[in-house]
């Protein structure tokens, strides 16, 4: 439910509405706008509560309109938050009209490897450095990451280059550890509905980068974001990274670029596209990155390794340094043509 106040509604009238909502045992969300205030009710009410509250609010002076939201997610919806959200991380703004690039290897393998990758990322004009210290792998025999040692390398290289850092956290009890080393917490596709993890990530106060699960519908995805937002953490970034394909002959996943305008219509949160996981094939990454820019994404996350052939994970989808630099140049040229800033 959203209550829209009249233009010029007084503080006393707004407080009356808020008090009426609190009388039903829920906390109102007051959302100032350019010309009027809206008040949202994030929690669900039963039919009797909703009917009673509507009757009470309808006679309070200053109330212009009462609408019932149609989405199961509230805080993530554009109905509750009409303006686009931008997430500020150090000197980098994600969302709000600019296009950001997150680049780096799938895994932090050594200081030398990661430092080399970071220098290429920075030289090319990307502003966020990605790298996994903990790697959820299908096989228990595959490289699982360097754990805390990888986090230490990530922080050291981030400090040296001045790049914002992002890395995956896999469980709620690890949120505190990862938060000590990185700027943005990544929730991987396999963990999208790990609800205890989402809650702890929300409590951390850190920006949270949430990847869509490979079988998740849009509502599932936004409800996962709702778990983080419900902890009072507004710094949520959505990531489309591909869904289960009908045909795995040619690509690892089907990159659902139609999700970008859909998410932008129904949610105020910034949307990033991951063409590396979305295709799983290095030669398709640049075309899909350019497509992500055109459909209105707020940025991309791309895997780049100094030597993909020797990568300990996901080498087949990682760009070489030359490919990454070429992609960045092409994106900037395209962005200039369509009026998007980097």
Image (tube, rainbow, N blue to C red):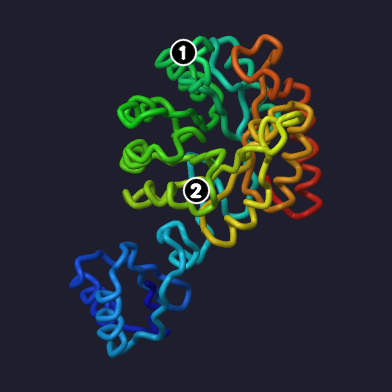
Question: Percent from the top left, x then y, of residue 244?
Answer: 62, 38
Q: Residues within 10 Å of mark 1 (few under 14, many from 20)?
A: some
Secondary element at tag 2: helix
Q: Viewer-proximal residue, 215 or 291? A: 215
Question: Percent from the top left, x then y, of residue 321?
Answer: 73, 21
Image quadrant of residue 161?
A: top right
Q: Is residue 137 above or below residue 326?
A: above
At horizontal 40% and vertical 16% (from top left) the residue drawn is 148
Going from the N terminus, do you reach mark 2 or mark 1 first? 1
Image quadrant of residue 10?
A: bottom left
In the picture, measured across the screen, residue 143 lies left or right of residue 262, that is left
**Residue tagged by mark 1?**
146
Q: Is residue 39 above or below residue 192?
A: below
At horizontal 42% and vertical 58% (from top left) the residue drawn is 73
Q: Viewer-proximal residue, 289 or 316? A: 316
Q: Please identify the quadrant where the C terminus is shown.
A: top right
Count of picture labels: 2
Q: Is residue 61 visible?
A: yes
Q: Is residue 205 visible?
A: no
In the picture, measured across the screen, residue 321 lies left or right of residue 155, that is right
Return the residue found at the far front: 246
At horizontal 37% and vertical 72% (from top left) the residue drawn is 1
Image quadrant of residue 199?
A: top left
Q: Residues within 10 Å of mark 2 (few under 14, many from 20)?
A: many
In the picture, measured across the screen, residue 162 lies left or right of residue 315, that is left
**Residue tagged by mark 2?**
221
| CA distance for labels 2 and 1 | 29 Å
Tell me the tag on residue 215.
none
In the picture, measured across the screen, residue 279 lies left or right of residue 80, that is right
């Amino acid at each position: 439910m959203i209550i829209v106040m009249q233009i010029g509604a007084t503080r006393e009238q707004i407080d009356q509405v808020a008090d009426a909502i609190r009388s039903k045992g829920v906390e109102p969300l007051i959302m100032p706008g350019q010309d009027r205030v809206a008040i949202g009710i994030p929690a669900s009410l039963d039919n009797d509560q909703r009917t009673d509250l509507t009757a009470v609010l309808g006679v309070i002076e200053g109330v212009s309109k009462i609408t019932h939201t149609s989405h199961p997610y509230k805080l993530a919806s554009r109905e509750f938050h009409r303006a686009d959200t931008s997430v500020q991380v150090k000197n980098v703004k994600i969302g709000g009209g600019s296009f950001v690039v997150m680049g780096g290897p799938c895994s932090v393998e050594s200081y030398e490897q990661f430092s080399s990758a970071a220098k290429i990322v920075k030289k090319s004009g990307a502003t966020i450095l990605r790298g996994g210290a903990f790697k959820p792998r299908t096989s228990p025999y595959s490289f699982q990451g360097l754990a805390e040692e990888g986090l230490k390398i990530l922080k050291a290289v981030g400090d040296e280059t001045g790049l914002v850092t992002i890395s995956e956290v896999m469980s709620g009890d690890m949120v505190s550890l990862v938060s000590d080393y990185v700027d943005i917490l990544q929730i991987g596709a396999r963990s999208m509905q790990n609800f205890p993890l989402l809650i702890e990530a929300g409590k951390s106060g850190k920006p949270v980068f949430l990847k869509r699960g490979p079988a998740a519908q849009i509502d599932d995805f936004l409800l996962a974001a709702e778990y983080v937002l419900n902890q009072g953490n507004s710094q949520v970034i959505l990531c489309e990274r591909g869904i289960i394909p009908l045909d795995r002959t040619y690509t690892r996943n089907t990159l659902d670029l139609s999700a970008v305008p859909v998410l932008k219509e129904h949610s105020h949160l910034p949307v990033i596209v991951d063409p590396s996981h979305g295709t799983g094939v290095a030669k398709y990454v640049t075309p899909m990155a350019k497509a992500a820019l055109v459909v209105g994404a707020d940025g991309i996350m791309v895997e780049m390794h100094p030597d993909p052939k020797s990568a300990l994970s996901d080498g087949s989808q990682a760009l070489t340094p030359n490919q990454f630099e070429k992609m960045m140049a092409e994106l900037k040229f395209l962005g200039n043509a369509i009026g998007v800033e980097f």
